[in-house]
Image (spheres, helix red, strand yellow):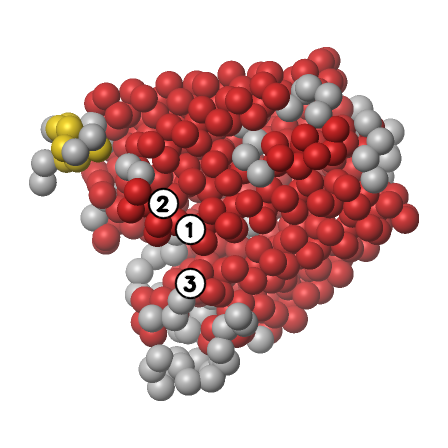
Amino acid sequence: MIPSSSAPFRQDAPAHFALRTALLFCAPLIVNGFAMPYFPVWLSTLSLNDFEIGIILAVPLLVRVITAPLVGLLADRIGERARVLVWSGMLSLLTALALFVSHSFWFVLIIYAVQGAVYSPYVPIVEAIALTGVRRWHFDYGQMRLWGSVAFIGATMLGGVLIGIYGGDMVLPAMAGGFVLTIITALAAPRVGRPRQPSVVATLTSPPPRALRARDLQLLLIGVTLVNASHAMLFAFSAIYWQHIGFTGTEIGLLWSAGVLAEIVMFFFTKAITRRFSIWTMIFSGCLLAVVRWIIFPMPLGFWGYFVLQCFHAFTYAIMHTGMQNRLVQRVPEAQESSAQGLYFFYTGLFTAILTLISGYLYSWYGVDGFYAMSVVALAGFGFATASFLSQPQRSAVGGKTSEAS
């Protein structure tokens, strides 16, 4: 159901907090729903080669790893984070409009990199506002965040229909329209005042606390984020490949939506899964199924084969991510929660940027067979996760599951 806009949990909560925050999640994920699957398709219409496409897609990912913490720190210090959302949406819209001006490689690269910088803090700040509502007034985070995923699926499906009608020409107008929505929802965002603890990305401007420097945690963070980053070639080139083998825009939209929907379903059953399976089972299953997913991807599967394979996302991201978050809860004090999430963001962004760049070369040289390299990356992630399991402090087996002495 849509979050209730009435009866806040405390009288000092901003009016209609849950509803406004749900809408705040929707706008940037509408942008992502158009951009993630179809911006690479637009790039492929510009006579750019796969090397150049890989570079254009990778540079903003690297830029945001640097800029998001700095803007997050600024947002925390100015006292009202929603103001940064307005500026982020406005500047992002200007960069989207600038892409209409010239389609040369260097111009697109620079403008898209600038867009990565100015847009990078938007979703983390929305997350911070939502978590403020959870901490201060006990709103349901999942109920607010769910509508962002629904918006992403809707935008992806609509984008698939539009790309079938208009081709890659629909991408820039759709993204620009999405950025207009980010401005509107930012203007209507709940004002929650100065944060009582640093936001996730802002913590990256300081060295990680001692608990996060533990060897087993560092190994696990590297392992899980390598598996996350092994999705880089999927994000960059799957829509281009599916279009190349004859799938319609609607079918491509359905394939992208299948992965997100599978992720939502998995998150819905998270509590039941965590009661039944250990954290390590969740993490290892995600790692190993990612290896299998990228080995199978180059095979001639047809639409329904790829549909089933996209549903693997429930494991290669959702269940593994849940296991990682629960492990952080076990090993990191609550006061260092934001630092832990910031480091997780940093590793994921850095590795994804590097592998997106490499994917451009792999896809140019080997085509869809380049996905075999992603399976090697996922296997390396499994190796780091295994090393973390073996090096965790004071391990003891209790009831078939790993536990730690307090």
Label 3 to label 1, Cα distance in Å? 15 Å
Left or right of residue 159: residue 390: left
Q: In the rendering, which numbered label is found on residue 269?
A: 1
Q: In this image, 52 relative to 207: left or right?
A: right
Q: Determine whether 151 is above or below 223 in the image.
A: below
| 1 and 2 marks in contact (CB < 8 Å) | yes
* Residue 366 higher or lower than 221, as above or below: above
Count of number-bearing discs: 3
Please tell me whether residue 388 is drawn above or below residue 204 in the rendered image: above
At label 2, which amino acid type do we have?
A: Ile
Local SS, label 1 = loop
Using the numbered discs, state the Cα–Cα distance from disc 3 to disc 2 in whole angstroms. Answer: 19 Å
- Mark identifier at residue 141: 3
What's the amino acid at mark 3? Tyr
Q: Label 3: few (<14), some or many (≥20) within 10 Å?
A: some
Residue 135 is situated, as x and y percent measured from the top left of the image, at: 32, 67
The numbered mark at residue 92 is none
Image location of residue 192, percent across then percent down: 41, 73
**Residue farthest right in this picture:** 165
Q: Label 2: which residue? A: 273
